[in-house]
Amino acid sequence: MVTVTTCQNGVRIVSEHIPHVRSISVGVWVNAGSRYETPEENGITHFIEHMLFKGTATRSARQIAEEFDRIGGEINAFTSKENTCYFAKVLDHHGELAISILADMFFNSLFAAEEIERERQVVLEEIYMSEDAPDDDVHEKLWAVIYPNDALGRPILGTAETLATFDGEKIRAYMAKHYGPKNVVISVAGNITDELLATIDQLFGHYEASKQAIEAELTYPEFTPGEIVKTRDTEQAHVAISFPAINVKDPAMYSFVALNNIIGGNMSSRLFQEVREERGLAYSIFSYQSSYADVGAFTIYGSASKQQLSQMQHTIDATLLDLVAEGITETELENAKEQLKGSFVLGLEGTEAHMNRNGVNELVHQNHRSVDEVLAAIDAISMDIINELITKILLAEPAIAIIGPEY
């Protein structure tokens, strides 16, 4: 059972007691992602995520790493377009130590000038690594086409130009705006105790919001169709095609995930079978859904040699046109439901998965469905809803990004 407790300052503690395990996963979730940055701030959310590991008033970066290694624990973080999460997984009797270190990082990071310079170079290398990988870069180019004038279209990592401007003052100013208690959720799952929850409240439940604190505001950007082609000397051409889709709060969300699985989400999907298995046109071909609080997209990715690119694109188009004309089959619908149920339940076998699910549910939905409720919602997916989504999504004009040799 998931329990939500709101501290006196507005921080929410989401806890799920799982007594049969010996681990605890805890995450500090912040409703701050790259979509809430100004153009000049692009990349600072991700840079702050790195900097919180670079030393506090009482712990060096090395000591933070060594403390978790010493107890056999894991600590990490990630930044998305809508939120940031700092998380740890440890044995249950090390839970209070883990949350105390996370709190130390959250409140007492020094942002020393020499560490900022060192980490700036690390993130710059991360940007270069992404740009060197066309199968990654093509998706960044795609989002720039979709939302050319909105933060959703800018890279989470930022750019070399914006990265060069970040310093301790800018970091603290951004955190003052976005790291206020009403934007923070502490999600903890596993063999937790009342003492651990009291420690979390003691550490996070009493700090005050800065006068600059703001609540994240949605921008409701409009999907922009178009095409970008980046010529590079690569063996393959990398293609990403995206259509406007639904937001994460849409009642048809489970149907959207099921439709993605049918089109290109797994090895039995239509695209995988047609493009790879039947015609041998590509090694990598798949689709995925991206759903945010206000907007969404459905994206297909494939890579092929210059000689086979045109045929791969034709096969993708033909597959989508067939879906629009004929819809899906009853067998595909039932298989998609069972796939969703299986992946959902099997994905909850670790405490980290529960922590992640509960953190996202609280940040985005402020609602926590039980496993049985989710399974019932999946069973309720109907052919009519799927076909409505096919028409709504696949008949729209797409955005396209291509990276590869001249063709």
Image: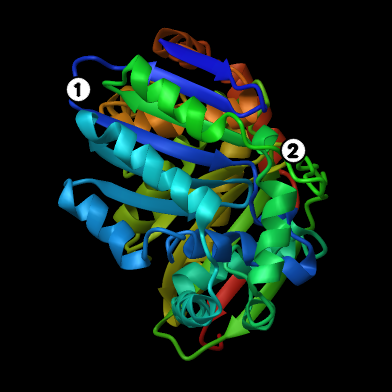
Q: Position of residue 75 (x, y in %)?
A: 33, 50
Q: Position of residue 114 (x, y in %)?
A: 50, 81
Q: List x then y, in percent, for residue 105.
A: 46, 52
Look at discs 1 and 2 and give the one toward the viewer.
1
Q: Residue at x 30, y 29 (%)?
A: 351
* Nearer-the-camera pick, 97 or 162: 97
- Categorize mark 1 by other alpha carbons within 10 Å: few (<14), some (14-19), many (20+): some
Residue drawn 50% across the image and 26% down it: 201
- Residue 269 in view, yes or no: no
* Image position, residue 2 (x, y; %): 45, 14
Judged from the image, the secondary structure of the residue bearing numbered disc 2 is: loop
Split into 4 quadrants, where in the image is the C terminus?
Answer: bottom right
Give, as a three-letter code, the residue at label 1: Val
Q: CA distance from mark 1 to mark 2?
A: 37 Å
Total number of numbered labels? 2
Residue positioned 69% across, 79% down in the render: 165
Please give left or right for residue 86 compared with residue 30 in the image.
left
Residue 21: mark? 1
Q: Amino acid at mark 2?
A: Asp
Where is 9 relative to 228, above or below?
above
Residue where numbered disc 2 is placed: 294
